[in-house]
Amino acid sequence: MTDTVRMTYREALRQGLLAALRRDPTVFLMGEDVGRYGGTYAVSKGFLEEFGEDRIRDAPLSESGFVGAGIGAALNGLKPVVEVMTVNFSLLALDQIVNNAATLRHMSGGQINVPVVIRMTTGGGRQLAAQHSHSLEGWYAHVPGLRIVAPATHADAYGMILAALDDPDPVIIFEHAMLLNVEGELAAEPGPVDLDRAAVRRGGSHATVVTYGGSVPKALEAAGELAKEGIEAEVVDLRSLRPLDDATVMASVRKTHRVVIVDEGWKSGSLSAEIMARIVEQAFFDLDAPMIRVCSEEVPVPYARHLEEAALPQVADVVAAVRQVVA
Amino acid sequence: MKPDRETVRGHLHAMLRIRRFEEKCAELYGAGLIRGFLHLYIGEEAVAAGVVPRIAPGDAILATYREHGHALLRGIPARQIMAEMYGKQEGCSHGRGGSMHLFDVSRRFYGGNAIVAGALPMAVGFGLGDRMRGTGAVTACFFGEGAVAEGEFHEAANLASLWKLPVLFCCENNLYAMGTALDRSEADTDLCEKARSYRMEARSVDGMDVFAVAEAARAALEYVRSGAGPLFLELKTYRFRAHSMFDPELYRSREEVEAWRERCPIESLKRTASAAGLLTDEDVASIERAIATEIDDAVAFAEAGTWEPVDTLARDVYARASGGSS
């Protein structure tokens, strides 16, 4: 049994980033308030003192400018980790991400790799209303050339940043804001993680719950409740949103024959729709019941607590969906 | 500085190469052998001819979709550029880019970028890379005056100046952003003022005079390389041809175009150099012959080029293959 340390998800992110900065002098962190402020979510607290202003680079509020600078630096011998405060703000940098990071390798006939890592928070649940709470990772997952990952566990929070920096392609890491304070165990000497595979977080034979990121703990909590009723739900954490690990998803579907998809994005044109489509294409005859999606209501996320709760997927919604799919 | 025969011939050769190469491209476009967008640089040759040869091999260049001239003068072989125009896999971007996306990383030529101002933030990152790694290299980023209206110009200008990065911003001011004249798109048409508002050194030069451009580029590169920070160089020029092959040119008068054609950088150089006894008719003829041979060879190479098999369509999307996922 390896030793583990109890810490928050935020601390696991911090430890991963710290390890990355310590092992490679070409790694640097750039973004709004990453330095003197210590990181909007305190992920880079204390880094400025250890690594200096060059490597912990406070950027002005110019998302397109500093994300593009990260891409350029990645093409010119550095290993940038660009932090964007939230996914909503990243829309100001869409041009750089979609038109440059995702295309340069292909457009140049394979002459260029773009080893940039971009991190951002995503998701709702903190009453921050409609410009700080959305889950737009599905949009990014639409784009060939990008790798999109969503760490849901402490091991992934720590390890994905290191794996992303080892990857020659542009990687965007989506960190769900509601996970930041979640306590969990991290191995004292965490091993490497991959960026490709989905993971079965809880085994079960009656239904498959496919989810990722901030919805993983909700799905696991729902599975715990369902187990009391004798319903064994298998929870598949996608981990990588692009590329998608179809094999792991289909293996679970072929075992349980019933599927619930939990995605904090909206249903229309979403990642949940993509997963459903792939299951239909690849495992339709294995299904014993229509699939069910638990997604955000199709409204901009509202401020008032009770309305926000109603807008986002909740544990009770997942429980109800699984009950229905196995009925 | 008094120009000598060698310099005159060098400038003329550089500008004529671009002119003749693009005239051939226009002809091939008419014949349906080149497709997509084709943005000609004709009229603006003194800019690339003055700046690009002054950029050191270790420096990086980022350009726009009107970059045939820059690519040629950076040393990408004409045959590879022409093959790219054809969409052949022997092209400098293996047929994946076309006219707007010429790349040659071995020559640190990081592309034609077809998003106006899209390369500017990347140029900042290149500068950051050189500064943090202590390479001593600089980055030259070309863009049209239309880019100055984009937020990315202002973000990049601020970042480069704030961080004192070794970036040369080369603004090719040909007075029209596609069909919109500068004074119809900018409240302040003094482009240098915008750069200066970010405390960036800014200079303006007659982009139709290759000697003036070459001297301005030399001084600008020296400034940027010294570590003094970025520099904004406005090159006042004019595009003689339409914006692209689809442009009916309804936005400017014939008289205006004719007036600028009188200032053709190639004809001007020929006139002044001949009058000064630095250029003979035979000089011009021999340069033309050499270029014609080069272009014929490029076309033959492109014609003989091959189409990439469709079954490799999905390559070069990712550098690393993913294990079992899609």
Image: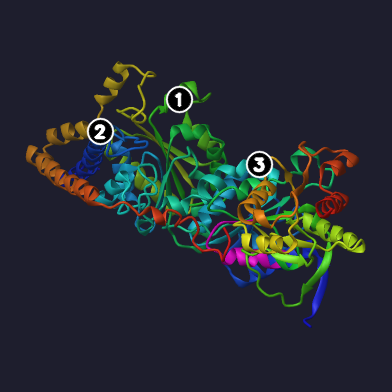
Mark 3 is surrounded, within 10 Å at the Cα level, by few (under 14), some (14 to 19) or many (20 or more) other residues, namely: few
Label for residue B265? 2
Q: Are marks 1 and 2 on the same chain?
A: yes
Residue for point 42% across, 24% down:
B179
Q: Are marks 1 and 3 on the same chain?
A: no
- For disc 2, the neighbor class at 10 Å (few under 14, some 14 to 19, many from 20) is many
Q: Position of residue B128 (x, y in %)?
A: 53, 55
Mark 2 belongs to which subunit? B
Residue A26 x/y as whole percent: 56, 65
Q: Which residue was labeled with disc 1?
A: B182
Tally of numbered tags:
3
Q: Tag 3's secondary structure? A: loop
Name the front one of labels 1 and 3: 3
In the rendered view, tell whether residue B142 sits above or below residue B137: above
Residue B3's x, y, as percent? 20, 43
Nearest to the observer: residue A310 or residue A256: A256
Secondary-structure class at tag 2: helix
Q: Is residue B56 magenta?
A: no
Q: Name the kind of residue labelled 2 in the image.
A: Pro
Could you tell me which chain the residue with mark 3 belongs to?
Answer: A
Picture quarter with the C terminus of chain B: bottom right
Question: Quick check: marks 3 and 2 in contact, CB under 8 Å?
Answer: no
Q: Quadrant of the N terminus of chain B?
A: top left
Kindly identify the amino acid type of the residue bearing the numbered disc 3.
Gly
Task: Find out whether the residues at labels 1 and 3 contact each other: C-beta distance under 8 Å.
Answer: no
Q: Label 3, on which residue?
A: A269
Image quadrant assignment for residue A164:
bottom right
Range covered by the magenta-colored residues: A157-173
Picture layout, residue A96 above or below residue A78: above
Residue A26 shown left or right of residue A42 in the figure: left
Dividing the picture into quadrants, the one containing residue B23 is top left
- Assess whether mark 2 and mark 1 are in contact (beta carbons under 8 angstroms): no
